[in-house]
Structure formats: structure tokens, C-alpha cells
Image (spheres, rainbow, N blue to C red):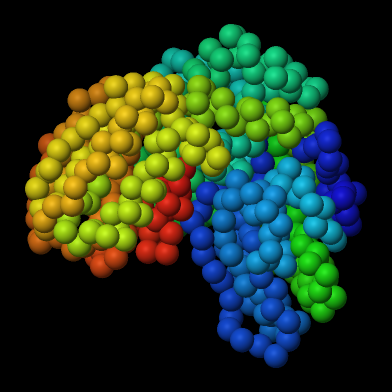
Amino acid sequence: ELCGMNRGMKKLFLGAGIFLITFLLAGCAAGSKEKGIFGLGSRDGETLRILSGSENQELEPILEKCMEETGVEVEMDYKGSIDIMRELQNGAENYDAVWPASSMWISIGDEQHLVKHMESIYMTPVVFGIRDSLAQELGFKDQDVSVKDIQKSIEEKKMSFCMTSATQSNSGASAYIGFLYALLGKQDGMTMEDLESDTLRTNIRELLGGVERSSGSSDWLKDMFLNGNYDAMVNYECLIIDADQQLTEEGREPLYVVYPYDGLSLADSPLGYVDHGEEAKEEAFLEVQEFLLSEEIQKEIEATGRRINVNQVSEDNKAVFKEEWGINTDKILSPIQMPDAQVLMEALTVYQTSFKKPSLNIYCLDFSGSMDGKGEKQLKEAMSEILIQENAAENLLQASAGEVNTVIFFDHRILGTETAADDSDEALAELYEKIAAFKIGGGTDIYQAAAEGLKIASRYDLENYTPAIILMTDGRSDNHYQTFLEAWEMYQEDIPVFSITFGDADPSQLEELAALTGGRVFDGTEDLTEAFRNVKGYN
């Protein structure tokens, strides 16, 4: 069903040939952010459970007002784009509505034609935010900049950037598709043959080789950027605005927005009803949607840095879209025809397996005595979803060309290390068999294992990899944090530690590691496999 948008400039054409208004990438954050629920508690009216992209978390104050005025309880369940697509393919039985960053995930996922009443709530382009002084040095300020110009700056080692995973996050996927079109020099639909081009392969690898850090969530990418020291990031315009507001408040250098003219896309943030035949739910949905599209609320949404009209901003909110930050609300956008679903999914597959910078994964796996039984079983099942490539392909988590996978087995000691011989399916399956055969040991020391991970990772030329230490534990370590801190200060490498909690793990210890290294903690208590999948979206 076409997205029935009520403003002419919002009209996007969906279906066999998905059209996006190109602005390099796409909508505001649908990234692979782990599951989260938002709601205000029980009410007398209907409850709407909405499957949403994580970018809409910033609109929760507006949703609170919506619930107060309509009496409809709204529960937001935040998931990544691929997860939203797969939920729709499976019938989305637990949801009454979907609100991803981009219509393309509904178009691909809604195979059962359940979604109706689809309307764009706001729009936001995906752009480059480059440190202001660097943008000046590169000659990008107040100029038309192409993807080739950016590629050249990367080839000359003048710039690197952060970007979300194209196979987990809408912003990353949209950016990547924009890159492909620009490098192909095409405006028409991409084909399977295009993806086999040796020239394209060389150019896209060069461009993606400039990715310094990856992420499964656009909002988290923004926070990581603010806490780090990076040249640039690809993200939604609304999140660049948010970042610049914070940077300015702190007296730091803002980011300058660059809109590559030959490969940009716009997210349309569609809110659609999932029809399970419940008339009362449908009426409640329409009431909520009408509230969000009302003139007053649209202006409130615009005040968050999201666009309501493509090429203009209301007088009330012009101060939000600052020209000195490179924000251009008058820029004319041209639509490109997105590839059909089969080509799009193939493009995402080759991104994961061939085009992206190789991952360097150091898995620190807790085999302490408390893991005996259920914990051990779930850990091994979760690793099979990552290392057995047939399983990994179901979630676009296959190993990339040149990827390194090492496992550190630990309890209160280092029990052993194993590294896959190469990136082949057979070598990864062999590594998994070693995990499956490993036996449970004694106590727990996460810090020694993480320090060993740093030691191993530092042996590689990390400019050629996206590294991560992935730590899984169900217990609490004795206070040996100093062991890791000394290793961190010795190696001085930008290697994030991503941790997964399970059982009685102490989140405070893991949060401490995440804060130091620019990592993140994921909750694996309910679904360990899903937690591992979420972590993999970050490198």
C-alpha cells in the first residue's frame, strides 16, 4: 500500500520500485539498538504496542503528551531495521503498529500486506558531520561535495569517519546504498550485475576503509562520537544538530554538515497500523496518528531538528537549523529509484561479506563453574548463531572477507585461546566445534581476560580492521580492575569492550569497562543469542 502522506513534498513512492528522496542515506536512527520498552502505565483506554526505530526515543515527551490528551496508552518497543523487517515478515503478531525510520523496511517486510494507514510523521536526511576546522581544510564548506570527494580525502589519509552498520541500522544501510549509487554514477535502479563490478568493489572498499568505528545504533554512535576524538560521522541530520547543540554548550568545536550531492537519501519515518482485525485498536491508532500530525505537534517535532517539509523550516524553528553548522534547508533534493528487494538484500549481503572493513573479534567467554548447565548451553547456542555461517546469514551477520575471530576461554584464569584459521565457513565452524567441546572450570576474572584480549588485538595493524573485545560473563570479578587498566594504558589502542550480562553478572563492573573503552553493555539475561547479535552490529 502506498504511504498516504498528507503533504505533497512528503510523497514517497513505494512498492516494486521503492523511491526515496535522495539525500545520501536515510532516516533518523533506526539503528540496531537493543530492545527497549517505553510506556506510561495502565490506562482505561486502548493500549497500542508500537514496534519502532530507536531514533523515536527523543520524541517520548511528545508521546507522553499524546497519551494524556487521547487516553490511549502507547508502548514503544525499540528494535533495529532488520529486526523490524523480520517481525513484519513473521506477521508482527505482538504489535499494533510499526514506526521505522524508512518506508523501505515496511515495503520489504510486509509480505502479508498487514500495514495500512501509513503516514510520514517527519523526515530527516542522512549526512556527513565533519569537524568544522577539518571541513574547512578539506574545502568542503559552502561547496557542493560528492562521494568521490570524500573518497579522495580518505585515500589521502586526511579523514576517517564513524558510521552505523549497514546490515543492522537504517542510517548505515541508507548511507551505503547512496555510496553505491554515487560510485556507479547511476540514477536508475541498481542491478545484480552492478554489484559484481570490480571497479565498484575497489572504490567502495576504499571508501568504507575510512570507517574508524561502527555501531548498531545511530543514537549511540552520536554519544560515542561526543565522548571520543573522531574526525567525522555519518548520521541523521537531526542527530548532528543534537550533537552540535551539546558541543556548543561545552565550548567544543561543532560539526559541519556536508550533503554529498550524488548519493543522499531522506528517511520518511512512516507510522503504520498493523491490521489484526481489531476495530478498537485501529480507532485508537488513528487517534494517535492524528495527534502526531496536528499542526501544533508537527512544530514540536520540527523543534527537535526533524523536518516537516523537505525544503523549508517554519519561522518558529529556524534557529534550530543553524547555517553556521552547514545546515541547508533550501537544498533541492532529487529522488533516485532504490533497487528492488532482491538487489537491496544482495547489496547488504556483499557489504557484510566483502565490502566492509574486516572485523577483528576477540570473544572472551566465561566458562566458570556458575555457567554449568543452562548458561553453558545458551552460550554455545549463541556462538553458533555467529560462527556457523548458515545461521549468521539469517541476520546478515556473516564473517567479512579478511575477518579475524579469536576466542579466549576464561574462569579465574585464562583457560586457553583459539583463533579461526581464516574467514572461511569451514574454519569458523571448526572454531565453533572447539567452543562446543570446551568444559566448565572454576571462578571468574573478567579483567584478566579483557586484558589478554587487548594484548592479542594489539598485534594487528588496527587501521585495517574494526576491532572489538566481546566479553560475556555471568558473575562478578574480584577487584582486579587495575590489571585491565594497566594493559589499556600500555597498548593505547582504540579497542572497545562490549559486554553481555548473564545470570548474576555485575553490570557496574562491565559499565566501567565500557566507559573507559568506548564500549557498551548488553543485557543477555532474557535472550543471550539476541544480545550477541546486537553486539555484532557494532563492529
Q: Is residue 257 left or right of residue 429?
A: right
Which residue shows up at 61% across the image and 37% down it?
173
Which residue shows up at 72% across the image and 67% down it?
96
Task: Tell me if residue 233 comes above or below residue 106 in the rendering.
Answer: above
Indicate the quadrant where residue 108 lies. Answer: top right
Q: Residue 497: x percent and y percent?
A: 29, 46
Which image quadrant: the C terminus? Answer: top left
Task: Tell me if residue 236 comes above or below residue 344 in the rendering.
Answer: below
Which residue shows up at 22% across the image and 51% down it?
366
**Quick one: which residue is furthest to the top in this view?**
198
Asked if residue 78 shows in the view, the reply is yes
Task: Tell me if residue 230 comes above or below residue 144 in the rendering.
Answer: below
Q: Is residue 416 left or right of residue 287?
A: left
Q: Is residue 22 left or right of residue 141?
A: right
In-front residue for pair 297/437: 437
Task: Tell me if residue 134 comes above or below residue 95 in the rendering.
Answer: above
In-front residue for pair 225/487: 487
Q: Residue 343: x percent and y percent?
A: 70, 27
Q: Residue 323: x percent and y percent?
A: 64, 44
Asked if residue 315 shows in the view, the reply is no
Which residue shows up at 87% across the image and 50% down it?
1
